Image: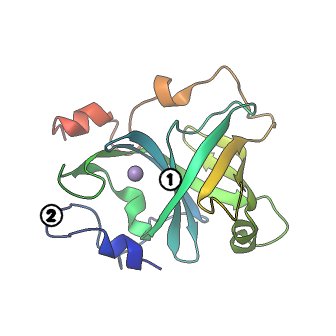
Amino acid sequence: MLDDYLSKRDFDKTPEPRGGGEAPDADGPIFVIQEHDASSHHWDLRLEVDGVLKSWALPKGPSTDPSEKRLAIQTEDHPLEYANFEGLIPEDQYGGGAVIVWDAGTYEPLDERAIEESLEDGHAKMWLAGEKLEGGWLLQRFKPDEEPDQWLFIKLDDDKADARRNPTSTEPESVLSDRTLEEVEDGDS
Ligand code: MN
């Protein structure tokens, strides 16, 4: 399942993990949201499913406002240890630019069935227990025949919903290192 991930990268040049490493220690399946200043700035949502991180690129990041439907473009599966990756991917490499771990934690499926089945059907609800994001979210695939990789990531209207919060701008620091994307770009450690 990591074939795409491995074939897109030259591991002599990128600091990204090669796969086959350890998953972060956690009490349940993990999720992570990385902020990534590639050719277009975006956030990457990743969910641990079946030994890999299922991944979606969010051009506008996640929202805590249930009326905001955020586009999520499914991308290649990533290895579990990618959840701890932050650093600077060289500009001439795939995804070149700085990466920080913007949020991390565990998640719990909110559907009756297994997360694999929900994702297969294009409709998966989950409870995120992160440092910045908490509560229920829905991943909904749209136009499955024409645009199989296009999903929406939408906050469920529960007691953690908050239309006034804007954590992608007010809480820009990494939950791993407290660094911002700019600090990683400038080589601060
Ligand atoms: Mn990315």
Q: What residue type is disc 1 on?
A: Val
Look at 74% across and 59% down and name the residue there.
Answer: 124
Q: Mark 2, mark 1: which one is toward the viewer?
A: 2
What x and y, as percent, mark residue 84?
37, 57
User: 184 or 129: which is nearer to us?
Assistant: 184
Look at 64% across and 57% down and name the residue there.
Answer: 107
Label 1: few (<14), some (14–19) or many (≥20) C-alpha neighbours in 10 Å: many
- From the viewer's perspective, is residue 36 above or below residue 181? below
What x and y, as percent, mark residue 25?
47, 65
What x and y, as percent, mark residue 78?
43, 67
Separation of residues labelled 2 and 1 (CA atoms): 24 Å
Which label was assigned to residue 22? none
Look at 69% across and 65% down and name the residue there.
Answer: 145
User: 42 or 48: which is nearer to us?
Assistant: 42
Q: Quarter-wise, where is residue 156 in the image?
A: top right
Q: Residue furthest top?
A: 164
Q: Residue furthest right?
A: 112
Q: What residue type is disc 2 on?
A: Lys
Q: Looking at the rendering, in which quadrant would you find the C terminus?
A: top left
- From the viewer's perspective, is residue 85 above or below residue 172? below
Q: Secondary structure at mark 1?
A: strand
- From the viewer's perspective, is residue 177 above or below residue 163? below
User: 147 or 153: which is nearer to us?
Assistant: 147
Q: Residue furthest front?
A: 146
Which label was assigned to residue 32? 1
Label 2: few (<14), some (14–19) or many (≥20) C-alpha neighbours in 10 Å: few
Look at 71% across and 57% down and name the residue there.
Answer: 143
| Residue, disc 2 | 13
Is the shortest distance between ligand 1 and the CB of mark 2 under 8 Å? no
